[in-house]
Amino acid sequence: MEELDALYNYSMFSGAPQLLIPCFMACLWFALGTPPAHSQTNAAPLAEFATGADLSMLPHHEARGIQYFDGDKATDLLAIAKSNGWKIIRVRLWVEPNAKPEYQVSNLENVTQLGKRIKAVGLQFLLDIHYSDTWADPGHQKKPAAWADLTFPPLEQRVHDYSRDVIVHLRENGAMPDIVQVGNEIKNGLLYGSGINEAGPQPGGGFWEPDKGGIERGLRLFAAGARGVREGSSQAPLQIMLHVPDGQDTGFIKWYFSMLDKTAHEANPPLNLDYDLIGLSYYPAAPWDEKAGYEPWHLSHLTDSMAYLATTWGKPIMVVETNWPHAGTPRTLPGTPEYSFTPEGQMKFYQTLVGMVRAVPKGLGRGVMAWEIDTLNWDSIFDAKGNALPAVRALGQK
């Protein structure tokens, strides 16, 4: 894939790709009549626009005695979500997390119990499979310890089998997900190998591994996970999501999805990337590029990315990770944040973001999910005492 390397000058650990050549490949392929390898949508679209939050840590916070209030009385956070118009809750899954309570909350049994609670109150359940024993993100996609020495074909099979078995377990225990993320923020692939971040000697699915073919291996692992999810669902309604970070970086978004298509077509044998939804992360209050400052993270850039995805690739889109502080002091960077770090600024951010996703072309904007608002820090939509802030209702579109 040397031609792809020439298109993008990439720094893996800064997460700061610099686009060198405009990404016109998708339009060219459409003009030539070549169907995109990731065009198939195998499940019905979401029946309604869905807002909510990632509440993966909720059982851990509850065990520590944290309470949530929407009025005078402490109330189950899931009940607060439901009464305020939220539709969906996201929960991450790790393969074999270590023994710390804040990590064990992400093992399969604890995720199953939280999934059952989510379904019992009438909310949708988005399962986020990290395929790791710990956090997976653009710089860290470490293989589970038990998988570290697998060569590539057995690793592909393990991803398939694990994905299938997880969904079977959840389905048989009353916690069937409505949406499943195959991987988390897979900007640079998943299940890194070839020594990246102490990942072990065997090749994996990191796009930029020294062993050539990392991009294709990464897509094969994604495809294996998607097949396993479909098999485990036993024809139950379920949607598969492909999730990437940096939703505001339209140059990256154009390159990435065109690269997926080109790689899938050129693979031997060719790959069909089976997914129904695109998930984006978007953190405009905390830009990682200190020199660029706040402006490249403004909402207008996210809008451009979503418009491109909707009109070029025709997939429904959700912002599945985002937040805005209700307190604190903005970092001293070029430009200014779009909203104040106050409860009112936070509310306006969510109101505007929800409106922008609703306005995505072709009706393909499908939802917004806030990140870990159950943690009572300044990014939460609850104050330090657990009282609901105005953003709770804004996120529920009330």
Image (tube, rainbow, N blue to C red):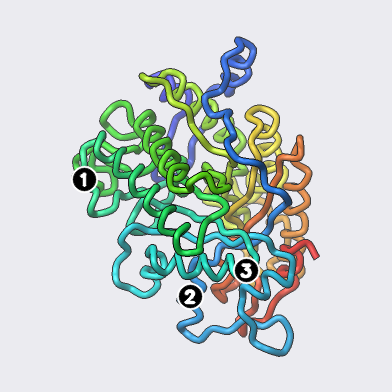
- Helix, strand, or loop for circle 3? loop
Mark 1 is on which residue type?
Gly
Looking at the image, residue 41 lies above or below residue 358: above
Residue 383 position within the rendered picture, expressed as x and y whole percent measured from the top left: 64, 79
Decide: few, some or many residues near mark 3? Use Cα within 10 Å; few <14, some 14-19, many ≥20. Answer: few
Indicate which disc residue 200 carries.
1
User: In this orientation, which residue lies closer to the viewer: 368 or 285?
Assistant: 368
**Tag nearer the camera, 2 or 3:** 2
Mark 2 is on which residue type?
Pro
Looking at the image, residue 367 lies above or below residue 314: below
Decide: few, some or many residues near mark 2? Use Cα within 10 Å; few <14, some 14-19, many ≥20. Answer: many
Contact flag, marks 1 and 3 (Cβ < 8 Å)? no
The residue located at (54%, 22%) in the rendering is 21
Mark 2–mark 3 distance (CA, rounded to whole Å): 30 Å
Residue on which the image places disc 2: 59
Quarter-wise, where is residue 54 in the image? bottom right
Decide: few, some or many residues near mark 1? Use Cα within 10 Å; few <14, some 14-19, many ≥20. Answer: some
User: In this orientation, which residue lies closer to the viewer: 254 or 394?
Assistant: 394
Indicate which disc residue 329 carries.
3
